[in-house]
Amino acid sequence: MNIEGYDAFDDPYCYPGTTVLKNLLNIQDQDTLDAFEIEISTLRAEEPLPEGIFDTVHYRAVHHHLFQDVYDWAGQYRTVRTSKGGNFFCYQEYIPAQMDALFQGLRGGEAFVELTSSAFLQEIARFLGELNAIHPFREGNGRSQMAFIGLIGANVNHPFAFERLDRTTFLPAMIASYFGNREPLIVELGNLLI
């Protein structure tokens, strides 16, 4: 399974004849763009993240905050179909409705209040797995997901230590959640709880 790159179809986000995403600095080399994107989104993540009521507007504001220096579409839902490793994410025409339904279940973050650590891990893994399957943005979904669940965790006294995240085990856990097995993701998230 190819987990490195995205497959997109009729992709207006890319420079013609390439798979390099159009960006604000007009970087057309993938390695250079990747390095810049990681550096600037990491710096933005160290700043205070946007406040909100844990709804789709708040989530889009977090994505915009992290990627505002890289993409002019930061914070906007994607308009193309994408897949990774041959596995399709939510078709773009269904993203708004799917996001609204998922975030309505958060009840402004109240869904996580007063949960035990174990119950919190069950619920946050469910939310994260579903959010990942929707994959609402053309790029930057993973970093936005981590930043957002970090806000949720801090808000309900279940903070995460993302510096302990091990991509070699976390990414396969995310893939397993895509296929309905959340147990590895629960374990990974549990390893990050403070």
Image (cartoon, rainbow, N blue to C red):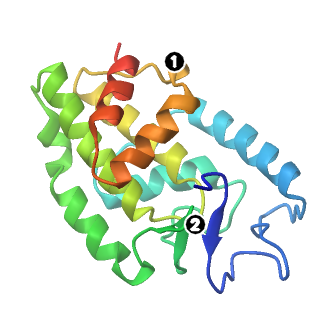
Residues at badges 1 and 2 in contact (C-beta under 8 Å)?
no
Question: Circle 2: is it few (<14), some (14-19), or many (20+) Cα within 10 Å?
Answer: many
Q: Position of residue 117 (x, y in %)?
A: 19, 20
Residue at left 51%, top 18%? 164
Judge whether residue 58 can be spotted in this image.
Answer: no
Relative to the observer, which residue lies in front, 101 or 59? Answer: 101
Relative to the observer, which residue lies in front, 163 or 190? Answer: 190
Mark before the other along the chain sequence, 1 or 2: 2
* View extreme (top): residue: 194
Q: Position of residue 79 (x, y in %)?
A: 52, 80
Is 54 left, or right, of 148 in this rendering?
left
Question: Circle 1: is it few (<14), some (14-19), or many (20+) Cα within 10 Å?
Answer: few
Identified by mark 2, the residue type is: Arg
Quadrant of residue 192 within the rendered picture: top left
Quarter containing the C terminus: top left
Residue of label 1: 164
Is 173 left, or right, of 169 in this rendering?
left
Quadrant of residue 168 within the rendered picture: top right
Q: Position of residue 127 (x, y in %)?
A: 27, 47
Residue at left 51%, top 69%? 76
Q: Give the mark count.
A: 2
Identified by mark 1, the residue type is: Arg
Judge whether residue 13 can be spotted in this image.
Answer: yes
Compared to 144, does 71 lie above or below?
below
Q: CA distance from mark 1 to mark 2?
A: 26 Å
Q: Kindly identify which numbered label has been placed on residue 138.
A: 2
Is 161 left, or right, of 56 in this rendering?
right
Relative to the observer, which residue lies in front, 25 or 187? Answer: 187
Residue at left 74%, top 38%? 39
